[in-house]
Amino acid sequence: MRGVVQIVIVLAIWGCGGSNAGDPVVKGAWVRLVPAAQKVTAAYMVIENAGAEDLVLRSAETGAAGVVEIHEMVHEGDVMKMRKIEELTVPAWGMVELKPGGLHLMLINLEKPLGEGDGLPLLLHFEGADKRKMAVRVRATVQSAVGQLSH
Amino acid sequence: MSRRWLLLLVCLLPWGCASEDGADSDVEFELKEYGTLGGDFALTDHAGRPFRLAQLRGRIALLFFGYTHCPDFCPMTLSKLTQVFDLLGAGREKVSTLFVSVDPERDGPEELKGHLEQFPVNGIGLTGSAARIDSIARRYGVTYAKRESDSAAGYFVDHSTYTFLIDQQGRIRYIFRHGDAPKLIAAGVARLLREEE
């Protein structure tokens, strides 16, 4: 009987850990291909929230770069300004798009040169209601943005 | 054959050619005059050689200001110009892209070379002393400001997002803005190419 209870508990936890409503879902992640000499790049993706509570992206990390920061581009009176932001809210039942000219994750101090088509692992740390913590693993594809229409 | 018919024929000829090159939206494009804005300048190019705008005489240039530590907006502009070059077809051979760094402290010729070589836009990266870049930016009506931040990337540089269309005599003939589509920019260049004929 004890074994059965354990299995039930394990299954319940496993169910929650899957992509059930309430967890962030990351789609279409890509990283801009940059020349070997350049030590910074940007990562883009769509983060969906199919749950009833707001989710907050607090931080991100990758083995491929020393630091990952959340940045926002603001275009004011024909001047482009880049800003570091501390967190990013993905609204309940909503989504946030990180795309060129808007939001991006900036990867700083790249460990080694990127290759087109490489998969770059990212770990995103989210927080939900009641400080519920979620970590989402993402594989972002390195892509050359040459000739790509960004918006 | 009356003179009027001849005139019509002359007007239609280059239009027909431009259509074949794909930049067919140039019919309505109007070039502008900007008086004393812009002008010649001297900097160092991405190969470490001295560069003057005047040495491009006879070529068309698309000039913008940026910096290589900007991983988002600056490559976006270069991606857009790559599309412009695609639209230009054979005309692209007469066009150069000039990337003037607003971050001479971090952008030497090497950084500019690496940044530009991924984009097939006949790119020339330009840098120089802060004082010289200040003076060029002022003459082109461009603002930029170094802004300290607690980012691990160090400081940011806020900068104007204009792309200048420079004619075969080194004069500004149009100022494109951030939202302008590749098709419009290609139309402007095609218009200048047509004036040549």
Image (cartoon, grey):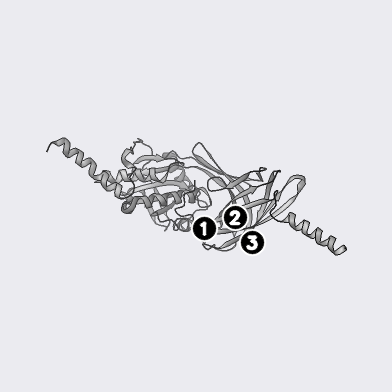
Residue A116: give x, y in percent of width and height.
51, 62
Query: Disc 2 versus disc 3: distance between alpha carbons?
Result: 10 Å
Question: Secondary structure beneath disc 3?
Answer: loop
Marks 2, 1: nearer the viewer: 1
Residue B56: give x, y in percent of width and height.
33, 50
In this view, B151 is above or below A120: above
Q: Which mark is residue A107?
A: 2
Question: Secondary structure beneath disc 1?
Answer: strand
Pick the residue in front: A22 or A38. A22
Pointer 3 with pointer 1, Cβ within 8 A: no
Pick the residue in front: B111 or A62. A62
* Residues flagged by tags 2 and 1 on a common chain: yes
Q: Residue at x 63, y 43 (%)?
A: A94
Q: Tell me the quarter of the image containing the N terminus of chain B.
A: top left
Q: Residue at x 29, y 47 (%)?
A: B18
Q: Which residue is mark 1?
A: A143
Marked residue nearer the N-terminal end (2 or 1):
2
Q: Residue at x 60, y 62 (%)?
A: A111
Query: Disc 3 versus disc 1: distance between alpha carbons?
Result: 18 Å
Residue at mark 1: chain:
A
In this view, B22 is above or below A114: above
Q: Which residue is mark 3?
A: A63
- Position of B179 with respect to B5 (left or right) is right
Residue A21: give x, y in percent of width and height.
69, 49
Q: Residue at x 74, y 51 (%)?
A: A133
Marked residue nearer the N-terminal end (2 or 3):
3
Pick the residue in front: B172 or A116. A116
Q: Amino acid at mark 1?
A: Gln
Pick the residue in front: A50 or B56. A50
Residue at mark 2: chain:
A
* Residues flagged by tags 2 and 3 on a common chain: yes
